[in-house]
């Protein structure tokens, strides 16, 4: 038996969750059994846990789109007992039982061996948010956005993706502008490496089709009017890495930034991107992320505090990275 946070669907289509004891025999028949040490609370998890969006496809469901842990059993030759691994995406916590439990059984192709530099706790201090941030930075680099090209904007700056993106970009030598609706966390953002901070209201309303050229690139986790206004203010040939929809999934923009300034809009898929890209992202995180900065952005909660924390996240009352210690 082991503990897991389990979501069940009620008659009103709302999901309710509680910590339950589960038999190992109830886990899906997959290749690798993992003893989970940590999961995290991401924005997508919060939407699922509060029934704010139809994230969960099957019930009952163990939520949690990522986890870190050790291999306990394996029929996959790529993974040996005792190896430390991390999982991001592939539909866990949505279609398949996820990381907010003490054990999981998953397909071996979904796992990445954890770089030796990171502990299991540090792996989830990074989590899906940090891994997504690294994918965004890789997209900027791929499209030629180098530190000498000018300032890079990071939206949703106090969130998980934003916090890690600022830290990585700063270490790589970029000038970083952070957009946030929470001015009370300005010192936190500066400590991570943001040189300039703007209020999110400057970007969140309908703007002009083409604005002044301000940023060489951007990492956006917000979407909607914010993403449209960013595209309108990117320098010629710049790139926006789009990875979220906190404001909305619409894009009320025109083609003008793309056909008049050659702006690139790079979509970032952290759920089903290739294993090669996943391994590259984690290898780069081991090099380009200042581990000491992680301590500034994490808080740790047990399984029985996850739902309350999810409500706080959607209400804008949390910041940084929230680690779930599934054994606490």
Image: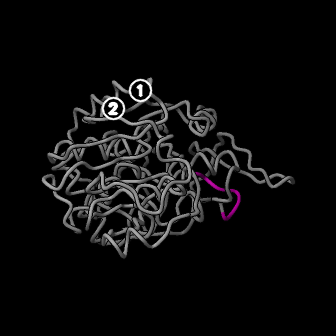
Residue topped by disc 2: 189
61 drawn magenta: yes
User: Is residue 64 in sight in this rendering?
Assistant: yes
Q: Position of residue 100 (x, y in %)?
A: 53, 46
Residue topped by disc 1: 185
Q: Secondary structure at mark 2?
A: helix
The foreground one among 302 and 276 is 276
The foreground one among 203 and 47 is 203
Q: Position of residue 307 (x, y in %)?
A: 63, 37
Q: Contact (CB < 8 A) between labels 1 and 2?
A: yes
The residue depicted at 31 percent of the width and 47 percent of the height is: 165
Give, as a single range, the part of the protein colored magenta.
57-63
Q: Position of residue 135 (x, y in %)?
A: 31, 60
User: Is residue 108 in sight in this rendering?
Assistant: no
In the drawing, does residue 124 fall left or right of residue 23?
left
Cα–Cα span, label 1 and label 2? 6 Å
């Amino acid at each position: 038996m082991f503990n897991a946070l389990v979501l069940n669907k009620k008659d009103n289509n709302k999901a309710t969750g509680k910590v339950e004891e589960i038999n190992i025999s109830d886990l899906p028949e997959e290749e690798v059994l993992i003893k989970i040490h940590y999961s995290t609370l991401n924005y997508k998890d919060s939407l699922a846990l509060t029934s704010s969006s139809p994230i969960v496809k099957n019930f009952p469901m163990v939520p949690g789109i990522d986890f870190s842990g050790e291999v306990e059993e394996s029929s996959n030759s790529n993974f040996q007992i005792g190896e430390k691994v991390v999982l991001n995406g592939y539909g866990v916590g949505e279609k398949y039982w996820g990381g907010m439990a003490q054990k999981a059984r998953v397909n071996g192709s979904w796992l990445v061996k954890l770089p030796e530099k990171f502990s299991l706790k540090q792996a989830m201090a990074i989590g899906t948010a940090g891994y997504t941030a690294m994918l965004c930075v890789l997209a900027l680099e791929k499209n030629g956005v180098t530190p000498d090209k000018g300032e890079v904007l990071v939206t949703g700056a106090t969130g998980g993706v934003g916090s890690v993106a600022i830290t990585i970009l700063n270490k790589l030598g970029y000038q970083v502008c952070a957009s946030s609706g929470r001015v009370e966390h300005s010192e936190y953002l500066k400590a991570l490496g943001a040189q300039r901070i703007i209020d999110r209201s400057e970007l969140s309303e309908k703007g002009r089709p083409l604005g002044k050229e301000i940023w060489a690139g951007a990492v956006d986790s917000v979407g909607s009017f914010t993403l449209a206004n960013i595209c309108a203010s990117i320098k010629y040939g710049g790139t926006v890495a789009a990875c979220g929809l906190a404001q909305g999934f619409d894009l009320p923009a025109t083609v003008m930034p793309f056909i008049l300034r050659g702006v690139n809009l790079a979509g970032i898929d952290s759920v089903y991107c290739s294993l090669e890209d996943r391994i590259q992202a984690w290898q780069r995180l081991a090099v380009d992320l200042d581990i000491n900065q992680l301590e500034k952005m994490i808080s740790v909660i047990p399984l029985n505090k996850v739902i309350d924390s999810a409500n706080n996240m959607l209400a804008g009352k949390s910041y940084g990275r929230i680690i779930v210690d599934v054994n606490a």
